[in-house]
Each structure stands twice: as C-alpha cells, then as structure tokens.
Amino acid sequence: MDAHAEARAKQITIHIDTQPYRVAAGPTLVAALRALTEPPVLAEKDLWLDIDDEQDQKLDPASTITAVEGMRFFTEIDAIVIRIDRVEYEVFERKMTGAQLRVVPSPDVAADRHLWLDVPDKRDVKVQDEDIIRLHDGIRFFTAPGRINPGQPDMANTGADGSGFSELDERDGA
C-alpha cells in the first residue's frame, strides 16, 4: 500500500454538532477538533464528547483525545425545558441521572418520594437515582409517595374499638 492510500485508510468520520468531518484516527488535539467547524468553535464555548449511556464529557481545549470512528461531539447547547410536578425548569444537560433530576426543583424532591418519567400512551417509568435519562424539550416527570398502603385505615379516624369507623361515621349512617 502506498503512503497516500495508507493515510486514507487511517481517516475516520467524527461528528461535531451533527456535521460529519474526516480526521486521522488516533491522538488528536481538542484544539484541532475545534478548528474543524466553519466558523471554528468560539473560545467562550465548550466542546463536549457525547457518550452513549453515560454522562457527556466536557473537553479541555488544551488536551488530546484519541479519535475513533463514529465519535460525536457537540458545542454548548440551548436550554432544555423539562417539567417536574407540572413546574417547568430549564436545564443545560442532554442527559441527567435520577439523582441530578431530584435536585432540579427547590426544595429538592424529598427522599420519601419516588421520581417517575411520564411516558405518553405507555406505562410510566420509575426513575432510580443511578438511571441516566436522555432529556429533550417538554419531557415530563412527576413525584409520588414512596410508600402507599391501599386499604390501610387512617388511624386518625379510627374508632375507639379499632374498627376503622369513627363515631362521626356511625352518625352519618356509614
């Protein structure tokens, strides 16, 4: 294989803000990646490595990264509007863990409540603290008590005999 063909064989495709770019495989300066776009990524903007099923990584402009086929990068993103218990919040992450989502509202979601992802037309999904959720505009979450005891009598309204009926219930004909 001649030198020109060998160089072409080592070229890979990466994506920055959804646009494909051909680069040499292997160690690559982050500054060189920033210079690929037209115009180049501005100094006041961050460049991020998009990692599937994990937290994305903010790249130091002075560092080196090992470029491999299919890597995806993005620059700073606009705010994403999410809803927790019908209240809108702006976040600047594309992915967040359940633990991170629990601290978005103020005050935080209480420890005795569960966080749920509201899935339209399907069964809702309980979000564990370690779960990584890919966010998009309009995604909805809700909280619910962590422990619900259906059929458990309300002890505040239990009759003196422990029957579950209070004297008030008996007077109302219950």
Image (cartoon, rainbow, N blue to C red):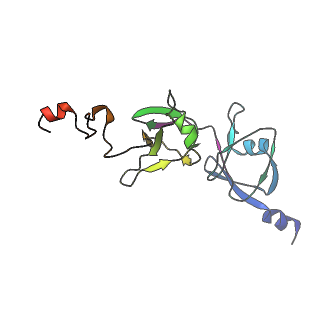
Quarter the N terminus occupies: bottom right
In depth, the one of 113 and 140 nearer the eye is 113
Relative to 24, residue 55 above or below:
above
Q: Position of residue 68 (x, y in %)?
A: 75, 57
**In the image: residue 2, left or right of residue 157:** right
**In the image: residue 139, left or right of residue 58:** left
Quarter the C terminus occupies: top left
Quarter of image, res 13: bottom right
Outermost residue, bottom direction?
1
Quarter of image, res 173: top left
Magenta range? 72-82
Q: Is residue 47 magenta?
A: no
Outermost residue, front direction?
161
Q: Position of residue 101 (x, y in %)?
A: 53, 38
Relative to 105, residue 64 above or below:
below
Residue at 13% from the left image edge and 32% from the top image edge: 171
In depth, the one of 157 and 85 nearer the eye is 157
Residue at 32% from the left image edge and 35% from the top image edge: 155
Residue at 88% from the left image edge and 65% from the top image edge: 3
User: How many numbered discs sit on the rendered protein?
Assistant: 0
**In the image: residue 65, left or right of residue 13:** right
Q: Main secondary structure of the magenta part?
A: strand
Quarter of image, res 7: bottom right
Q: Position of residue 62 (x, y in %)?
A: 81, 38
**In the image: residue 53, left or right of residue 13:** left
Q: Position of residue 88 (x, y in %)?
A: 44, 32
